[in-house]
Image (tube, rainbow, N blue to C red):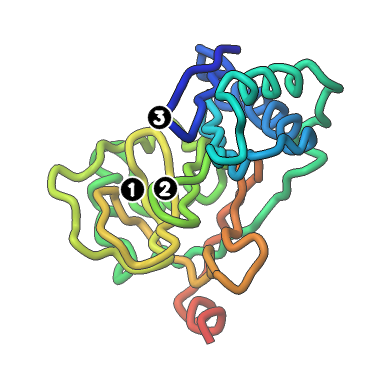
Amino acid sequence: MRIESLGDSALLLRVTEDFDAEKSLDAVLRATHQLKAAQIPGLIELAPAYTTIGIFFDPPRMERFDELQASVERALKGDSAPARDTFSATIEVPVCYEDEFAPDLDVVARTSDLSRDEVVRRHAAANYLVSCVGFTPGWAYLSGLPPELATPRRASPRKEIPAGAVAIGGTQTGIYPRKSPGGWNIIGRSSLRLFDVERNPPALLQAGDRVRFRRISRQEFDAFAT
């Protein structure tokens, strides 16, 4: 592990140099758990990513910058954190893949040389892992997309994508938690609320969670939405 400065109020902890969806996430989440458990004075937020953790702190509460670095190093040498499966969840996401919700399904089908139905079947049959959360509040980057479904992002991003849009971008899939611009290929939509400021935590999906998509009809989509 390596600790680097990230401005005047943050550190960047490089947990591993090599990215592997499972192993990297295990290492990042274990380190995150250790840092949380240490309750380091002045530490205000941890932002786990693929291979790193952003460590944000309140400068006035820190006497010296190197004190925080030393505290981080001590925390990481402490007791081993529990395995990821003990603090993660498996979440089922209902998705309607009907034409009106899937403007880019034909693009993915052509790219993968598969029928539309086969693209949907393989997308919904896979097991996904939330590698990290970012881009917009509640957005989860999901690893585990079948490699044959990988599709480059759109050359021209859309100015507005509806909340719940399920999309493919490169080798990953994801769900837009709220209305926003975006350049991923939209192949369906879920009525599941992924981000709610009244919920604790607000984001439904957390790093380390497992995700399964379940194909539903338009009628079921309307029922979920009410």
| Residue 158: % across, % down | 19, 57
Dot in front, 3 or 2: 3
Please, what is the three-letter code of the amino acid marked with disc 3?
Answer: Gly
Res. 127 visible in picture: no
| C-alpha gap between disc 3 and disc 1 | 49 Å
Please name the residue that numbered disc 3 is placed on. 7
Label 2 secondary element = helix
Q: Nearer the viewer, residue 73 or 144?
A: 73
* Residue 219: image location, x then y, percent: 49, 82
Q: Earlier in the sequence, mark 3 or mark 2?
A: 3
With respect to residue 109, does 37 lie above or below? above
Q: CA distance from mark 1 to mark 2?
A: 5 Å
| Amino acid at circle 1 | Ser
Residue at the left extreme of this rendering: 156
Instruction: State the SS at label 1.
Output: loop
Q: Which mark is residue 115?
A: 1
